[in-house]
Image (spheres, rainbow, N blue to C red):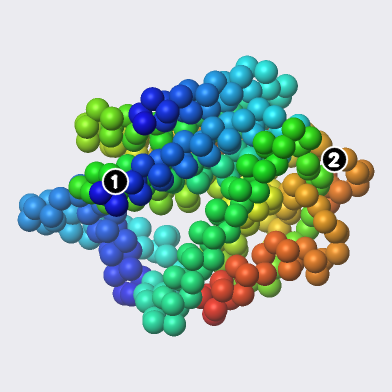
Amino acid sequence: MIYIYAAFIILAVFFAVLRGLLGPTTSDRVVALDNLTTISTAGLVLLGFVFQRFIYIDVSLIYGVLSFVGVLTIARYLEGGL
Amino acid sequence: MILNILGNVLITIGVIFLFLGALGIFRMPDVYSRMQAGTKATTLGALSTVIGVGILQPEWFWKTLLIAIFIAISNPISSHALARGSHKIGIKPFMKKEGLDSYENVSIEEEK
Amino acid sequence: MSRFIFSFGIFFLIWLGFTSSFHYQEVIVGAFLSLILAFLSYKSFTERGLFYLNPKRLFYIIKYLAVFTIALVKANFDVARRVINPKLPINPGIVTYHTSLKSDTAKMFLANSITLTPGTLTVDVIDDKLYIHWIDVISEDPETIYNEIGKDFEEILKEIFR
């Protein structure tokens, strides 16, 4: 089961990174980045379950909070009102 | 036993939707449609994965629920801010029929 | 005063979720910190306080969560259908949606719910107009837009924030 989950998550990361590399505009790259952070938040929780380590859950929570703030900052910067 | 199966089913649904969301942002033609696919599919995917892990490990349930609530609140907000920002810097939405962009005139009027 | 108690309760619940242990030392420190935080921030974070704790409103909040979950699942199957189809059946455009909600919190909930329901994404909110990116524009008639996009949510939110 774990290998199937890993395969889907690797494919998801692959397509998101591809869009980030190809994206014609800055916004496309930021959208890809936003998706990557959500995928890694879920991936960290799954990793914590596979390794049976509670600390990964805390890491994923803080990662989610920081990525939210980061994406909001980039959005404000795009608008020109930082 | 039932909880075990339920948790695994939730995680499977979650990773499939995470994959579909990433495929969506790869295939869609413009920023706004990409955001649609990305936000919805990854939100449900992450929610379902995280809660599935919480069901498989009952002593982690409260913290995973907290992560799930946080994702559900923060994801739409960040995509809304990104959509507004992209429209402000002048990225035109992809349209099959002309003249469906009712927000266009508003953002020009605000600048004057 | 009711706003203060409301903030304290929310902070304390978040603390209990973070530590996820009910040892008495953790609970005492958490209560103390929540008191300080609630005292510092209750004026800027809440508008109505314990206003929401009334059986009728709680019933509508639960109903809202149920409607929202169903819409979220529907939205995902909608996205999956569009993404997997090789022809990519979309017809996007931005439409205007008129809301009759007054309070800012209600508008925020409406905008977030619209973002997570099938085929729609809120681009901006100005006064009582919501600008919505719709992936499959059926018609530009305001009545149809209201019925298709946000009727269910708006009726429940009106009851909650009355």
Instruction: Judge the density around disc 2: few (<14), some (14-19), many (≥20) Cα neighbours within 10 Å.
Output: some
Is B4 positioned to the left or the right of A74 in the image?
Answer: left
The residue at 61%/48% (across/down) is: C77
The residue at 58%/36% (across/down) is: B21
Residue B59 screen position, x and y as percent: 20, 47
Task: Tell me the kind of residue under disc 2.
Answer: Met
Task: Tell me the kind of residue under disc 1.
Answer: Asn
Is C20 positioned to the left or the right of C133 in the image?
Answer: left
Q: Which chain carries label 2?
A: B
The residue under label 1 is B4
Q: Which of C49 and B45 is in front in this view?
A: B45
Q: Which chain carries label 1?
A: B
> Which badge, 1 or 2, is on the more N-terminal residue?
1
* Secondary element at tag 1: helix
Residue C87 screen position, x and y as percent: 79, 35
Q: Distance between the residues labelled 1 and 2?
A: 46 Å
Is A79 positioned to the left or the right of C70 in the image?
Answer: right
**Residue furthest left in the image:** C24
